[in-house]
Amino acid sequence: MNKVFIKSLSKRIVTSIITLFLLVSFLFVLTRLSPGDPTQKYLSAEFSPELKEKVTASFKLDQPIFNQYINFVANIFKGNFGISYGYRQPVLSVVWQFLSFTLVFATLSFLLQIIVSSFLAFKSIRNKGKLFDRSVLNISLIVYAIPAFVLGLSLIYIFSIQLDLFPSSGLRSLDFESNSFFGKIGDYIYHLSLPLITLSLAGIALFYKYLRESLEDVYQQNFILNLKASGYDQSTILKKHVLPNAVRPLLSIAGIELGILLGGALITEVIFSLPGMGRLMMDSIFARDYPLVIGCALTAGVLMIASNFLADMIKMKLDKRLIKGLIN
Amino acid sequence: MNNRIIVILSFIFILLLSACKSEQPEYNNRIVIGIPADVKTFNPLFALSVNEGAISELIFLSLIDFRWNDELGEVEAFPSLAESWDWAEDKSSITFKLRSDVLWSDSTSFTAADVVFSLDVYSDPEVQSRLYGIFEDFYTDEQNHINVEKTFIIKSDYELQINFKPGSSPDLFDVVHPVIPKHIYEKYERKDLGTAEANFSPVSNSPFILKKWDRNQTITFGVNKKSFLYDENSVDELVFKIIPDYTSRLTQLKMNEIDFMELISAEDVLELSEMENMIIKTIEGREYDYIGWNNIDPELFSTSGGVTPNKFFGESEIRIALTYAINRKEILEEYLYNYGTLATTPVSPIFTYFVNPELEKYNYDPDKARSILSKHGWSDSNNDGVIDKNGTEFKFTLTYPGGNPLRSYASTLLKNNLKFVGIDVSLETMEMGTFIEKLLSKSMDAWMAAWYIPIPIELKAFWYSDLYNTQMNFVSYQNSAADKIMNDLLKEQSRESKRKLYFEFQKIIHEDQPMTFMYWKSNIIGINKRVVQKTISPLGAITHCWEWTVNR
Amino acid sequence: MLVIFWILILVFRMKFLYNLIQLWEKYFLLLTNDLQKAIQLLDSQLLDVLISITLFILIPALFLFFRKKLKFLSININFSLAVLLTLLLAFVFAPIITDENPEFQKDLRMTKLLPPFSKVKVLHLKAGDISNSSAAEKFIAFKNQIVKQSYANNIIFIDNIKRKPDKIIYLQKEKSGELDLNRVQLKNNKSIVTNKSFILGTDEFGRDIFTRLVYGVRISILVGLGSVVVSLLIGLSLGFIAGTRGGIIDIIFSRLTDLFLAFPIIYLIILILAMFGNSLLTVIIVLGLSGWMSLFKIVKSEVLSVKNKDYITSAVMMGLPKMTILTKEILPVIMIPIIVNVIFQFSNVILAESALSYLGLGTGNSYPSWGAMIESGQQYITKAWWMILFPGIILIFTLFSANNLGKNLNKANISVMH
């Protein structure tokens, strides 16, 4: 069992590395092919052709593309992703400054999505067919169809402009440092409420839909009906038999969703002026900051693959438990 | 049971909210300025964007303090790090007497060595500062690097003589750049200066010290009480708050969350001016929109570098006709609400003494446009509503960078204007980076863009015929008479003869009409009434902002 | 549903329809008289109008004629189907539903940012001298009266007018102007002043939001369908090849799929758009490029599973060409999952297009796309809520309906399989 596991794990790691390598190479070619170049931002009345040459040379963009690529690959294997043209800092340290926010924000949103959607789904299934169930179902369908920017803008309009309850942008207040510990947490909540709602609602609707469907399916399966008929405790049935079965289809979706969240919530970050990966990536594309573009993409790729992997692991674990349960 | 938990949770939540709101003090001696993008560096060598430039000049002072004089329409020099300066009789050198009471924020004293080091670094090819290549009046090596031995004579710690190359015509602007601390930056290799840690935690010589930099959120400056510019009314803190979204920025201005904001849309001025807490000011004449007509044929230039007149816009008369056909005034009135003036030449109206008042403006007159066009053989021979000449229809694409409401507005109107005289324009928006690439390669027929003009007047960088070295001459304007004037201007010293040359240049440009000059746009600024400031000038909204104070 | 649409149009646009039919007639006359000229005059706008009016007349006729054969007419129409059908109708009949040009703007001072149900007074001026010499010129004059251009020289929007003996003074907000009497259209020696209403208000350019929404349907559906077709072509062909050939090709294509799935696809879209321009065509292609992966997976796995079934192997042994078998056997099986997938993809694309417009990378200002409308509305969120609300609602309804339809189809499919 263990050997098989290690074998499949190593196989997976190898394919992931190949995929990431291909991704990075693909982006490398794409950025080098594109019009526009990083020296553009030097453009001013003082801009001289000599300066352009110097800058281009210092970015090593004057060499043939093939040499650039060889250099680039060699550096990557040394763990060196180069210096961001714009930030004038190593790519990884720039990425880290933005990633830390995204990690927290994405995790919070993900937890919120899981908790709220399972709460609603269980409540729905308990009141199946009743008003609560039907209305939540329909609302979730509508909510799922609301684009993030429409939702975000509406929330700002209602809660920031009309009611003045929440700020329309930013992460912290100016007096953040002077606050007590709870004040700091409160300040974060104060600033992040609207963005979290914007980011999470669609996910809540999606998870809710899947979870409710699979719960419904599982409850209708014969063995559950049998268990019920033989008088097993409701909560034991739920914990031991319903949950593991119902959660499985949700897991792969959750894995993908987490991956996407960790890649940066572009629209939400733009609307609420938050310093996350999404905006970093977009800005680096617009600024033709090639090393940073590739660094961001790679980070997003690693996180995406990792979260899918995590989901699969949990799934396997559940399967094992299921098998064990059946044998017993 | 669940419901009860929810009620309790939301109760706690609201408590927390009210807690954090009440912790904010009522009064603070702090000014908050809203800006759209974070800076990437504080080092003036690499400050490429307008905001980076302005902020780096707040922390690194220069030898001389330039201030705008409205009456003269020119900048005037005042002492700053230098107490006084003397030009040699023949202008071959200048001697600065420096203040002896200036300390860097780490308490090291400021000396002449810092000035020498700064100019040395600015011109070093290894460093790639934004000013590399402009030190033509100095003794330099073949790499344009200033020769330190020949150029600088450090007479004492506080007296410095700078020698210039014989035959050059130096002025103060060649020498005066923000001074950076030698004792900090000499620790780095020259080629690593761009990425130096010190760029992110600057040691300053101004009234401001960087207190905290929260990337993409806020930049907080504290005040340096040891600075010679400090006085007791100064603010305690100057904060730049980064708010990329315009609407959010405006909302925060209205709600007193920020005190100051630039580049307000004319659209919003009425509402703001009705608010009690708001003062509206404007900076005139720093930026103009224009429609670039490619004077040369883009295809030939991109394939072989050859220069032939453009088949549509090659003749100056045609370009004049196009200017006649465009109703610039309507855009100015209806979209900019007259926050701006119609532009005639690239010389801004703020340079009052140098603006040629005798040029007859090309006001909106579609009939005149039509008659000029038909005089040149453009008429609608096949009745399809589009004029043509020798079988070529007058059809072209006007490109403009996306994301600018004024330009998409103007282009929509302009399309209708030109349709009216029988010219078929299709519009195309383009992402900024790609757009600039196309400008540099001169591969577009027509486009709309803007110029932010330097002070003092700079013409050669934009209008000189040498298309390789004058990269900013996007329209590929070539006129030898204009070239001669621009060269003469560099040597001329007296104000009167300069004026004559500027007048002559403007006349030539006006008659050649290499582009259609649209309008000088005002930079509209909203300031909270609690802030007292007297220093808003064309030099920039936040220059000299150490003089701002807060009303109690 | 369809009947209601036709009746509504007939009631509200009676006069306009009549004019259009006249236009057709005149154009037909011109065609017979001066063929070359007529073809020269046929620009996309005129073509558009003529096609819609033709269809508008033809479709009911055809329906009446083939009433018996069209069974699908009797299926139940639910909300989502109704929404999608309305969109389809708006797509085809945009020039009939609204007689305005989506780009029309005039007298900004008067028409900018008007709330829904606003009315503005219109003063009619004399059009320029029309020399009614040739048939073609007459036709042009008539066409310009009916098919609206993005500009108009024969009207101005006003608040009020004052009549003086020899001239007319008009007021536009705080500004006033004068007009010579002989420039104004007169009826019984009185100037003609009518009302123009903007039922959903206007945007910052003084353009009618209703008209732009109707034309926006075209852009959004065009982008949606276009990129779905691109995805479909890529996904189907790659999946089919990978499934039938297997081996190294399969591995290469699978790696490619992994590559596209390995990081958030929105960045790839932005990257490509930023670098290669954001024209309508690139937006369609790029969005198409971003959604073929799931189709590829479906097709490939179905091909693989069918390939190994006994009856296929025996059919191959009997000497039937392999390709024909696969096509015949596989297509029906994968039809439904593909359709479901395509519908979801369609709604994803519409959403992505509007998100791109929001980020300033959409199809630009020249086309009235919903996303672009919402984006420009964001600037005016405090002053003009209608600029965001109406396109927002339409967008939500469209996505909701597409998702719902996909879901129902999926359910139906699963129950059939069981």
Image (spheres, coloured by chain):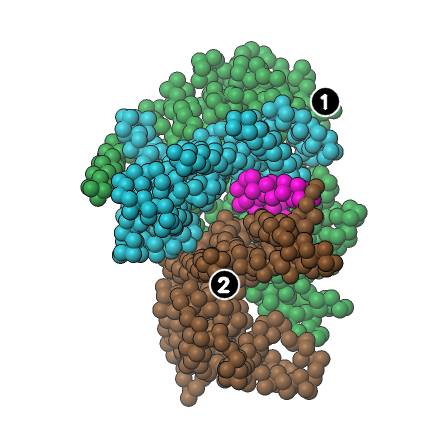
Chain colours: A cyan, B green, C brown
Asked if residue C274 lies in the magenta stretch, the reply is yes
Query: Disc number at residue B141?
Result: 1
Task: Look at the image and tell me in which quarter the C terminus of chain B lies.
Answer: top left
Q: Quadrant of residue B263?
A: top left
The segment highlighted magenta reads: C249-276
Taking the image as shown, residue C247 lies to the left or right of residue B351, namely right
Name which residue lies at 48% across and 36% down: A312
Q: Which residue is mark 2?
A: C216
Toward the viewer: C260 or B204?
Answer: C260
Q: Amino acid at mark 2?
A: Gly
**Callout 1 secondary element:** loop
State whether residue A244 is above or below residue C110: above
State whether residue C191 is above or below residue A2: below
The answer to whether one can see residue A207 in this image is yes
Q: Quadrant of residue C386?
A: bottom left
Task: Look at the image and tell me in which quarter the N terminus of chain B lies.
Answer: top left
Q: To which chain does the residue with label 1 belong?
A: B
| Mark 1, other Cα within 10 Å: few <14 / some 14–19 / many ≥20 | few
Q: Are marks 1 and 2 on the same chain?
A: no
| Mark 2, other Cα within 10 Å: few <14 / some 14–19 / many ≥20 | many
Taking the image as shown, residue B424 lies to the left or right of residue C395, namely right
Q: Residue C226 location in percent, x, y?
A: 59, 59
Toward the viewer: A268 or B50?
Answer: A268
Name which residue lies at 44% across and 66% down: C81
